[in-house]
Image (spheres, coloured by chain):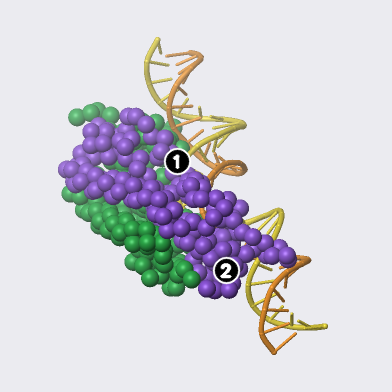
Chain colours: A purple, B green, C orange, D yellow
Amino acid sequence: MHRTDLIAIGELAARTGVAVSAIRFYEAKGLVEALRTGGGQRRFLRADIRRVSFILIAQQLGLSLEEIAAELARLPAGRTPNGADWTRISTGLRARIDAQIAALQRTRELLGNCIGCGCLSLKKCGLYNRDDKAAQRGAGPRYVLGDRSGEIAEVG
Amino acid sequence: MHRTDLIAIGELAARTGVAVSAIRFYEAKGLVEALRTGGGQRRFLRADIRRVSFILIAQQLGLSLEEIAAELARLPAGRTPNGADWTRISTGLRARIDAQIAALQRTRELLGNCIGCGCLSLKKCGLYNRDDKAAQRGAGPRYVLGDRSGEIAEVG
DNA sequence: ATGAAAGCTCAAGTCAGGTTGAGATCAAGG
DNA sequence: CCTTGATCTCAACCTGACTTGAGCTTTCAT
């Protein structure tokens, strides 16, 4: 319907709420692609609004940009993704959400059992067991948390 | 019971699973305190194992070290915290967990409604409404997400 | 008494996810 | 045509949470 199917970076930014600089950054990371005008300016497809929105949602769920790129790579190449395509990849997110909820519920219980009772014996409780990895959010420097493998805290 | 109520940094590290360097870092940030031997080495109380464990749990829940320091500051000064003390401050965490679970559940539903149906009109759905702030984890550079205030994505 | 293991300090580096600034160019309304 | 606002590139900087390395000292089991 609209005649301008291509939008400038500023409009994409305004529509999604992310900064122009962030969109350029995402492009550099391969999360979005842009056409160029004769003068070298970026032009995005309207469909990229949804793509960027997906990035935002996935980020809130704790995926790193690299992981998000991997998800987005599953969208069809060459054609604009349709509803079914989005449904498919958002299903993966749903699994992640469920895992996170489960992990939080477990943490919630254990907080009552362990800290509450005063033992806080994490090893015994399993607050830090490997399966808790699902609960790990926040990329980057916290990778230490991810390296945790065996023997954890046990109060004295 | 134990005669050695003071432990070296290496033991604290081993007991909690965090790196020695991280413990020094936490001390620098005021999250833990250490006594010193005549020769200048740190000696921690056994109770600090629990303190560090608390830091880890709180971190998993998305609190920044600064926020964690604020929580820990509510523990009694001068005496070793008892079970009731820990229960009190872990109650704050529980509220946070509940908020996070609620936010995730909302996101889960909306994922079905919005991405599933193919609209992904975030403004309409409210996937990015301000109350979603509770869902924000990961400190640092993502503060952009936190600055989001009004008009967000609407596919066009 | 001694030597390896563990600790100390301080400065600098790392990584993710961006932001900021300079200086130059493009696009569009009047 | 011209000006104004949007965009461009590239390099540098930022924050949070640590790690790494150098050079030196303390502990403690033998």
Residue under label 1, please give it.
A143
Report x, y in % for residue B75. 26, 52
Amino acid of disc 1:
Tyr
Pinpoint residue A138: horizontal percent, then vertical percent. 42, 49
How many residues crowd around disc 2 within 10 Å: few (fewer than 14), some, or many (20 or more)?
few
**Numbered label attached to residue A11:** none
Check disc 1 and report its element: helix, strand or loop.
helix
Chain of the residue that carries numbered disc 1 in the rendered image: A
Tell me where residue A106 sits by quadrant.
top left
Depth order, front residue of C15/A54: A54
Q: Which residue is drawn at 34% across and 62% down?
A: B113
* Foreground of the two, B53 or B62: B62
Q: Locate the N terminus of chain B and report the quarter of the image it occupies.
A: top left
Residue B89 visible in the picture: no
Image position of C8 with respect to B121: above or below? above
Rendered location of residue D14, percent (x, y): 56, 57
In the rendering, which numbered label is found on residue A5? 2
User: In the image, are marks 1 and 2 on the same chain?
Assistant: yes
Residue A4 image point, x, y percent = 59, 72
Q: In which quarter of the image is residue C19?
A: bottom right
Seen at 41% across and 55% down, the residue is A84
Chain to which the residue tagged by mark 2 belongs: A
